[in-house]
């Protein structure tokens, strides 16, 4: 914070800061992979409870809700991206 306040050690070039940041497609792919992992984990836990290998019903329900919330958030992001794309396409030149 002190370095930011004094301006020392921080590059003013926008290219320098974006070089370490992931690209949009990488960030989107990471988010999709994360949702997929949550859904697979929830599915594994549910299968374990169904077959009697586990009796952790509350943990299974929590993982299921995490996966559901993550999927819902991903769908909302997709809808916003689609809406933004449509607005750009319909923009008058």
Image: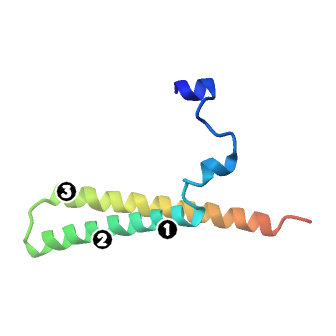
Determine the residue positioned at 49% across, 62% down: 74
Q: Residue furthest right?
A: 93
Residue drawn at the location 55% of the way across and 53% of the way down: 20
Image disc number at residue 59? 3
Circle nearer the viewer, 3 or 1: 1
- Taking 32 as reference, is 80 left or right? right
**From mark 3 to mark 2, how far is it between C-alphas?**
14 Å
Which circle's residue, 3 or 2, is located before the other in the chain? 2
Q: Residue 49: horizontal and vertical position, in percent? A: 14, 69
Q: Which residue is mark 2?
A: 40
* Residue sitting nearer the eye, 92 or 23: 23
Regarding mark 3 in the picture, which secondary structure is present there? helix
Q: Position of residue 82 (x, y in %)?
A: 65, 67
Decide which of 92, 9 is in the foreground and name it. Answer: 9
- Residue 42 place in picture, x, y as percent: 27, 66
Residue at label 1?
29
């Amino acid at each position: 914070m002190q370095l930011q306040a004094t301006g020392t050690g921080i590059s003013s070039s926008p290219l320098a800061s974006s070089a370490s940041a992931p690209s949009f497609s990488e960030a989107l792919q990471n988010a999709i992979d994360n949702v997929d992992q949550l859904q697979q984990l929830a599915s594994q836990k549910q299968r374990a409870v169904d077959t009697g290998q586990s009796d952790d019903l509350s943990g299974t329900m929590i993982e299921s809700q995490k996966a559901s919330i993550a999927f819902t958030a991903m769908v909302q992001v997709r809808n916003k991206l689609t809406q933004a794309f449509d607005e750009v396409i319909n923009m008058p030149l």
